[in-house]
Image: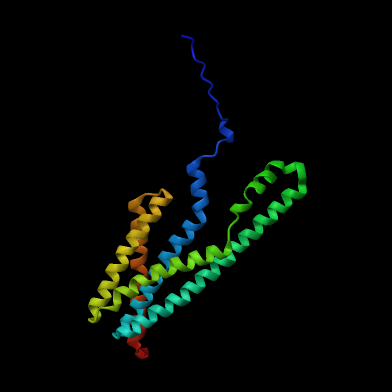
Amino acid sequence: MAAQNHVQITIPKENQVPEEDFDYSQRAQWLRAAVLGANDGLVSIASLMMGVGAVQENVKTMILTGFAGLFAGACSMAIGEFVSVYSQLDIERAQMKRDKETGGQNREHQEDGEGNKEQLPNPFQAAVASSIAFSLGAIVPILAAAFIVNHKLRLAVIVAAVSLALLVFGGIGAFLGRSPMVKSCARVLIGGWMAMAITFGLTKLIGSTGLEI
């Protein structure tokens, strides 16, 4: 039998794009907005409700305070993310314009810019994603407190629910970011506990001076 010739085409390493690195760079903006937004919403609203709970036992007051914080925080996150990403977009567009004007001197950058036009950050999408992520995190302590009549039990349930959510968010962030799981979860959990404890303590201190509502 005649020997068969196998032709193997080798792609130079410099022309290969690592798939995992590419995917992670593509998701970096959305990962940052989602994880930070959810954690911010969770810790901010939980701390706010714990602060109100330090001086007020009325469940309606705590729930309304939580929703007010949710709306205000979601708007703030959306506006902040929009401004930040739009500034990044302006910088990248300006760089692409400079590369185009220089012609052949930066031909490599020019080709990269042409190929990455569709990958430019979208300020509107980033703002919406950040706002939704904040709201998803913020709704956790609100739902945890909504159906608990006893005041002390309500505070305990908020802390428990928020702690569980912090562990989940910390674990997701560690998994997607390829960081140590235990350290990431512990860092997020301890930070959340500190925020709630400080807010509760300072509000209780101010309330003890006769400034309660």
Residue 49, given in percent of the width and then of the height, sits at 35, 77
Residue 133, given in percent of the width and then of the height, sits at 44, 65
| Res 197 seen here | no
Q: Report the number of numbered marks.
A: 0
What's the coloring here? Answer: rainbow
Q: Quadrant of the C terminus?
A: bottom left
The residue depicted at 37 percent of the width and 49 percent of the height is 180
Residue 207, given in percent of the width and then of the height, sits at 34, 86
The residue depicted at 37 percent of the width and 72 percent of the height is 139
Instruction: Say left or right for 64 vs 95.
Output: left
- Camera-side residue of 210 and 165: 165
Q: Quadrant of residue 134?
A: bottom left
Residue 205, given in percent of the width and then of the height, sits at 34, 82
| Res 47 seen here | yes
The residue depicted at 67 percent of the width and 48 percent of the height is 114
Q: Is 49 drawn above or below residue 108 in the view shown? A: below
Q: Pick out the residue farthest to the top.
A: 1
Q: Is 37 drawn above or below residue 153 in the view shown? A: above
Instruction: Say left or right for 82 vs 172.
Output: right
- Camera-side residue of 129 and 194: 129
